Amino acid sequence: MSKSDNRTLTLERTFNAPITLVWEAWTQSEHIANWWGPKGMETRVIKHNFSVGGEWEYHMTMPDGTDFVSDGIYSAIIEFEKIISSANFRPMTEGVEIQALFEKNGDKTNFTFHVVHPTEEYSKQQEKMGFMNGWGSVFDRLKEYIGTLTV
């Protein structure tokens, strides 16, 4: 395997909300269904066992009716700090690891999201397919959703 930094795509955001609220939005099924997936998609949480070794599965439906399935198994959870999971986003991406890192910044939350791919070539392919725009849209939705929780 190549070095992980050559296989990793990263997005960073700062959310204008306390870390407890951002963590809750990321980890609780009733919240996940409201923001997971790019704009225009409806998300259904099929399973969500938020524990190390626990499985998660979300189905996302595009406006044209096309379904995408995302699933994985949690491998590390440190409350208010990080979540690591295997992940598949069928039919586009399979066999990656996602790392969600949370850092308290006063009343805000610094968030870093890494996707580690099996190879450098696969990482480059995913970037060309629109990784930044796709996940950027997801985290824009998360930001909007968190805003509704703080009102």
Image (cartoon, grey):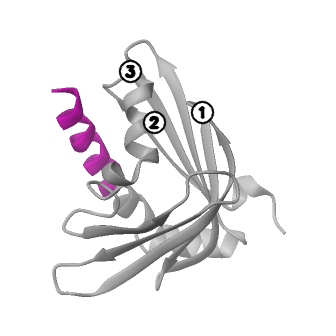
- From the top left corner, tell me how far across and down residue 80 is, in percent: 55, 30
Q: Is residue 15 magenta?
A: no
Magenta stretch, overall SS: helix
Amino acid tagged 2: Trp
Question: In terms of secondary structure, where does tag 1 sit?
Answer: loop
Q: Using a 10 Å C-alpha cutoff, classify the residue at mark 3 as few (fewer than 14 neighbours), some (14 to 19) or many (20 or more).
A: some
Q: Quadrant of the N terminus?
A: bottom right
Identified at 81% across, 58% down, the residue is 3
Helix or strand or loop: what does disc 2 sit on?
helix
Instruction: Using the image, tell me which numbered label, if any, was put on residue 23.
Output: 2
Q: Tell me where residue 34 appears, x and y as whole percent.
A: 26, 55
- Residue occupying image coordinates x 33% and y 56%: 138
Circle count: 3
Name the residue that disc number 3 marks: 108
Which residue lies under the disc numbered 1?
79
**In the rendered view of the protein, which quadrant contains the C terminus?**
top left
Amino acid on which the number 3 mark rests in the picture: Lys
User: Is 20 drawn above or below residue 54 in the view shown?
Assistant: above
Of residue 100 and residue 53, the one placed in the foreground of this image is 53
* 117 relative position to 139: left or right: right
Say which quarter of the image contains residue 123.
Answer: bottom right
Instruction: Give me the residue at 63% from left, 75% from top.
Output: 122
Vertical comparison of 36 with 113: above or below: below
Residue at (54% x, 26% y) in the render: 103
Q: Where is 109 relative to 84, above or below?
A: above
Q: Position of residue 16 (x, y in %)?
A: 31, 25
In this rendering, the label closer to the viewer, 1 or 3 = 1
Residue range in magenta is 137-151
